[in-house]
Structure formats: C-alpha cells, structure tokens
DNA sequence: GGTAATTGCACCATCGATGGTGCATAAATG
DNA sequence: CATTTATGCACCATCGATGGTGCAATTACC
C-alpha cells in the first residue's frame, strides 16, 4: 500500500475497489451522500477505503466542476511590515476557520502589478478577494467586477465596494493629542514644534492630516503652515526629509507624527547617519504598530488597528448585497508597552528545557 | 461588449466567434500553435478576438488537464516576523519571475497544522513546495513524498530533502565574537558575563549554541556552565527567562546572544515591565534581523540571512535529481545600521509632493 | 396479490483546457 | 499527370469531481 501510492487515488480508483459508481463515491466523500440516499453501509465502506488509500480530493477538479474553488485572496501592498504581515497571519486563521484556503499576494504598490496579481488569483478562480492597501483600488475593483468576484476593501475607502476601515481621523486625533500632551510635560510647546512626516495623497493620509490639524487647531488655536512633509511610502524618501529638516534647523522637531512604520524606518535611517546623537528630547507618534518601535530611546506612541475585528467584519460584508462601509476604532499604544500579537496564539510544541552541555 | 461580459469567455466561446475549433483556439492561446502548424492568419484573428473578449485562461482547468498547476507553495511558521515576511516578499518575486504563482501559508509552529496546510496546498496541485521553518520537517517531507511533490527546505537541515541553509555555526561565531569584542571595550569581561537566550532543540539552535560556545572557549579558554537559557520560540517564555535572571542577579548579563527576533521581543517585554531603567550597559547579539532593533538604546548586533540568494538556490535545487545541501553565509549587521530591505525595490508611484493646506 | 411508495444506486453530461491522431486540401516533385 | 510531401486544422478522449435524472429492487399498503 505504501509502495503503490505513487499516483494519488481518485474517486475512480475507489469506485473500482469498492464496486460502487464514481458518483456514489464522490457523494460519500463530499458529504452529500445522505441527501442522495446512499446506505450507511456503503458509505462506511467507501470511507474506510478512502482512508486506507489516503484519498485526497483534487480541489482543482472540484472547483472546475462546481465553480467554487474554496480559495480566498488577500491583496497586500507588501508583506514585510508589521501591519500587513500581521494581517496575513490573521487572515489565514480567519479563512481556515471558515473552511477556506487563503491565497495572499502582494501588489508592491504598483497599479500594474496589482492588476496582474489579482488577475492571477482570478485565473485560479478564487471565490472572493480582500483588498488591503492597493495603490489603485478602483482598478482592482474594476477587474473584480468584470470577473463577478465578490470583494471587500480593508483599510481602504470604499467608493464602489464594501470597506472596513480604521478610523483614521479619530486615530490621528488621539495620536496627535497624545504626543502633544507628552511633549508639553517636557517644556513649553508651540504650534511650530509639531510636525507630520510621511503619507501621500490617499484617503488615509488625508484623514490623518485632517485629524492632526484639527487637534493642533484646538490646542494652539492656529495651524502653522508647512508643518507637513509628504514623502510617500518610502523609507529613503523619508530619511531625506529628516535630513533636510535637520540641515535647516540643526535639530529634529520636538514633537512629530509619522504616517506609517515605513516612514518610521526612514527616521531610523536618518538616525543611523547621526550616530552619537541621542535624540532623547523628541516625542514621536507613529500611525502604525511595530513592537520594536516601542523601545527606542525616545517616547513613541503608536496606533494599532484592530486587524482581526476588521477581517471578521470583512467576511460579513462579503455576504452583504450592497456596498457598505464599516469603521473600526484603532487602539493607542503608549511608549514602552509591548502588546500581545498573533504570535501569542501559537502554542510552542516543545517545552522549554536546558541543554546538557 | 462590456455589458455582456458577465460570464468569463472560454475557448469554446472564442471557437464559436472565430469559427475555429476549440483545440485550435487553445493552442493559439497557450502558445503551442506554431508547433501545431496553425496559420499566422488564424492565430492573429483568434488573438485579437481573445483580447476583445478579455479572455483569461482558466488555470484550474488547465492544471487539471495538464497536471501542472503553475503554483509554488511556501510554508512558513509565521508571517509576522521580519525574517519570514521578508522571505514571503522575496519568494513572491522569485516565483513570479519564473512565471509561477506563489501560495504562501503558515503552519504556526504546530506539526498538525503544518501537515494540514501542506495537504491543502497539495489538494490544489501545487507543483513544488518550499519549506521554511517547519516544526516537523520530516512529517512534511513524508507528505510531499507520498504526493510525489518536489520540495526543498529553506533554512532547515535536510535529512531527506534538498536544503538551503544559513550557515548557523559561522554566523553564531561572527555574532558572538562581535558582541564580546564590543563588550570588552566597555570594561573587563568574564566568561560568566556572556549568555545565550532563546532557541530550542532544533538544528539551527544547536549549531548556534555550538558556535557560541566555540567562540567563548577560544576567547576565555573555558565555557561557563549554565550560560544558556532555552526558551523555545515564544516571546512570553523569553520574557520570563529575563525576569528570572534579573530577579536572581539584580541585572541583565553584560553581554548576551538572543536566538531570534521572537525571543528578542521577549527582551522588550521584560524591559516594558522595568520602565525607568535604561539598560544602557548591555551588549546584545540577535541571530535575526529587524531594522528597529538596530536603534535601541543599547548596541544590538544582528545576523541577517541572505534570503534572495537562498531562494534562488532553492529553485535551482528543485531541478536537482538527488538531495543536496547548500549553505549560504549570513551577514553581520552592526548596531545603528539600517540596511536596505525588499521595500526599497518598490517604486513608489506617486512622487512626493506637499499638500496645499 | 397488485399497485404505490420508498430505497439505493448507476448513468451521463458537464466544468475548461490539452494534446495525440487523422484527414482533407494544396503544393512540390519526378 | 500521378504521386509524394506539406499544410492547416478538426475530432475526440481525457484530467477528477459533481449533480440531475432515471430505473431496478425492495418494502408498504389496501
């Protein structure tokens, strides 16, 4: 038996060994056999033969016939960032919890590539798609429409499709208040001491900037011009922005808001070029979450979206007939707080022990 | 045309509109038409009709018929960790570069779940599998064997399958030397000041521990007993280990080697519980790479595997008839150095600009 | 004992694409 | 002009699973 298992067993093989027809075998194996009035006895025999021959359904064939593949896609811009990789992790559990198989792809912030990768998913007949952070959501939406593919946006504004978004405005306000309050405990603070770096002309950035300015307005009564430096989502462009600021003012702002952890990496690169300087007197807010950032030598406040709630609501929205938008409040993470992540849900199979050496 | 595109066009649809047979249409669309002596003219007509009807091949059907799916799997333990998410990112490019579609899944360090996820990949008829960091590589290997699935281990020792591994021994030696050298510049150092935290009874940990001890041996002439605290791959267990050490000695070791960034998170959690203490006098080595760790208030040396080279060699090894093992040297990253990551390869489509506010 | 209802399953077309084979028609060759 | 060779394509079985339909054999019922 272990020798002959070179080729995978099919329902036809089981049909031969069991003496039942292929369709009977199929219905036993896919669980529809009661509906088809297959006898308990026949079913039991086929199930035991299936186990014996290590039968595994060919899902490609099933998908082809039934036009339901059991695949759910997730389009990310990139993987290697705490937010998106954590989303991939959570997405995988949520998908499997629902009996689906996740296909996670990245569009690398390139509209052309986003389209291509989504088309490759469609070619494999995924049943639905989660779009998280596409550069060109409308282009992706268009493709999904044409393919009749149900889809939801995650953390993207939904002009056409359903969306679950973090409350960027509220989050930015919370973050801005937090850093201003902290910076004020360190000394007098003026509107001109409070900056924002990063972002781009997208919905999320606009909302965050609006929240940032709203808080500055209410705290200082006025908003300084030029308190925002747009850098796109690039570590190197952000590092350059800090270089420029530093060259001009001889220091960093007392207090600033960084649009994402990618931009935060830009700050780190800038600091890498200024070894020896401690930058202990700055207060930073980062609209993103990375546990490491929590332990830098200066206070870092972060905003952490509630990813699993967002995804859960996303699966709900797939059922919805018409486009809806749901907002989920993110969480403010104070400095030096290492929160739990999806890794904590893992059980580490080998218990700790000490090597005999 | 845009109205009627509700259902996806098939070769049969194109066969009707073009007047050619389905097999002719298929061969034109999959590029085998010259071999089949289809005329230039017919091919051109069909290609133009295909474009017009937005034809996209159903890859499930193709896979079923040709028993080549064009899917490559990557099994990770987890996504949300710099090393593995960076691997996912690089894997995706490498796969697409080869005309394949990546399917990345995580086994969450659970042998049972690893098996299940790999079986789900096999059910979709993936052509080959990259195994990175499985808890039970032999179990996975067994399943692949049974399914006749070509597979390579990445950064795992290859008892049965081909492997590309980081040189853990050499990397651990480089890392240990680096932190000892640094710590020695801060004051006198004894063998008892140099510890290792994290890891587990797996190949990588064993090699790293061997390298660690070899260097201690050569520097101090002897190895202290009990200089190693095994914690498994869990942030919380690692935090507890630091707690224990701290409770016993009233401080952290002057100089220590942390087995992975997951264990590193444990250090951060420990520090979160000791706010106010700066821990400025420690020197840390982390056998893993996270750009944020580079900028903590104490020196952190890191080891960063050359992921893209490992994956490239992995694709090569798939062709190989018999199991081979290849070692790739990792890179030592000194403190306060922010290196480039895969994100730098992305082009940020919207150029930086400043909001008019 | 004859008809009706139920049970248990087999048959067959189908999903979309592929590739081996074979057969007209046209062109080349002697 | 007869025969060989080349050209261009159609036909058909096939990959593995599914689900509608139909039909014998058994059981129930009057």
Image (spheres, coloured by chain):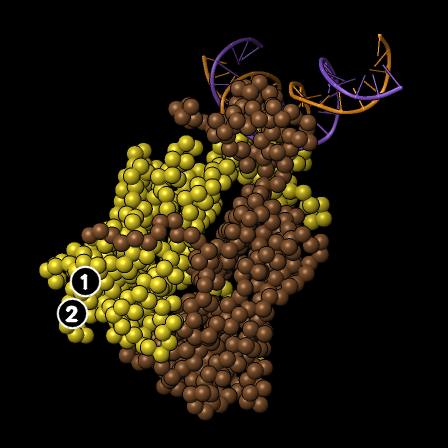
Chain colours: A yellow, B brown, C purple, D orange
Which residue in the structure is indicated by mark 1? A177
Which image quarter: residue B202? bottom right
Q: Residue at x 69, y 31 (%)?
A: B35
**Which mark is on residue A189?**
2
Badge 1 marks a residue whose secondary structure is: helix
Q: Is residue B229 left or right of residue C8?
A: left
Q: Position of residue B292 (x, y in %)?
A: 39, 68
Q: Position of residue A190 (x, y in %)?
A: 15, 67
Query: Which marked residue is nearer to the observer: mark 2 or mark 1?
Result: 2
Residue A165 in view, yes or no? no
Q: Is residue B65 left or right of residue A32?
A: right
Observer-nearest of B109 and A330: A330
**Which mark is on residue B112?**
none
Q: Residue at x 25, y 70 (%)?
A: A249
Q: Residue at x 49, y 40 (%)?
A: A120
Badge 2 marks a residue whose secondary structure is: loop
Q: Position of residue A303 (x, y in %)?
A: 28, 59
Subunit that carries the residue with mark 1: A
Observer-nearest of B49 and B274: B49
Q: Is residue B262 left or right of residue B162?
A: left
Q: Residue at x 53, y 54 (%)?
A: B91
How many marks the image carries: the answer is 2
> Where is A230 relative to B257, above or below?
above
> Where is B112 relative to D8, above or below?
below
Question: How would you rate the neighbour count of disc 2 (Cα within 10 Å): few for under 14, some for 14-19, many for 20 or more?
Answer: some
Measured in 3D between alpha carbons, the distance from the residue under mark 2 to the one under mark 1, in whole angstroms, is: 13 Å
Observer-nearest of B281 and A328: B281
Q: Position of residue D10 (x, y in %)?
A: 65, 18
Which image quarter: residue B235? bottom left
Which image quarter: residue A284? bottom left
- Marks 2/1 in contact by CB < 8 Å: the verdict is no
């Amino acid at each position: 038996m272990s020798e002959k298992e070179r080729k995978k067993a099919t329902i036809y093989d089981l049909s031969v060994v069991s003496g039942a027809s292929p369709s009977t075998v199929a219905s036993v194996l896919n669980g529809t056999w009661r509906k088809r009035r297959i006898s308990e006895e026949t079913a039991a025999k086929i199930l035991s033969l299936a186990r014996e021959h290590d039968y595994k359904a060919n899902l490609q064939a099933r998908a082809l016939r039934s036009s339901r593949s059991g695949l759910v896609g997730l389009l990310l811009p990139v993987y290697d960032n705490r937010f998106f990789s954590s989303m991939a992790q959570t997405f995988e559990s949520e998908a499997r919890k629902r009996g689906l198989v996740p296909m996670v792809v990245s569009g690398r912030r390139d509209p052309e590539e986003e389209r291509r990768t989504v088309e490759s998913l469609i070619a494999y007949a995924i049943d639905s798609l989660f779009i998280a952070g596409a550069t060109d959501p409308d282009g992706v939406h268009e493709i999904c429409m044409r393919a009749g593919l149900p889809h939801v946006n995650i953390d993207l504004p939904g002009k056409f499709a359903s969306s679950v978004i973090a409350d960027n405005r509220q989050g930015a306000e919370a973050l801005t208040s937090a850093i201003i309050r902290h910076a004020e405990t360190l000394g007098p603070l003026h509107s001109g001491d409070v900056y924002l770096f990063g972002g781009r002309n997208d919905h999320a950035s606009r909302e965050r900037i609006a929240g940032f300015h709203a808080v500055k307005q209410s705290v200082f009564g006025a908003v300084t011009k030029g308190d925002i430096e747009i850098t796109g989502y690039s570590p190197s462009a952000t590092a350059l922005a800090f270089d420029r600021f530093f060259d001009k003012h001889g220091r960093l702002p007392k207090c600033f808001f960084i649009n994402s952890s990618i931009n935060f990496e830009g700050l780190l690169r800038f600091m890498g070029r200024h070894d020896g300087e401690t930058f202990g007197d700055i207060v930073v807010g980062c609209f993103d979450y990375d546990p490491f950032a929590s332990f830098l030598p200066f206070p870092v406040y972060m905003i952490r979206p509630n990813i699993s709630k967002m995804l859960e609501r996303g699966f709900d929205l797939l059922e919805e007939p018409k486009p809806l938008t749901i907002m989920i409040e993110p969480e403010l993470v104070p400095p030096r707080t290492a929160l739990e992540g999806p890794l904590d849900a893992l059980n580490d199979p080998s218990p700790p022990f000490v090597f005999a050496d």
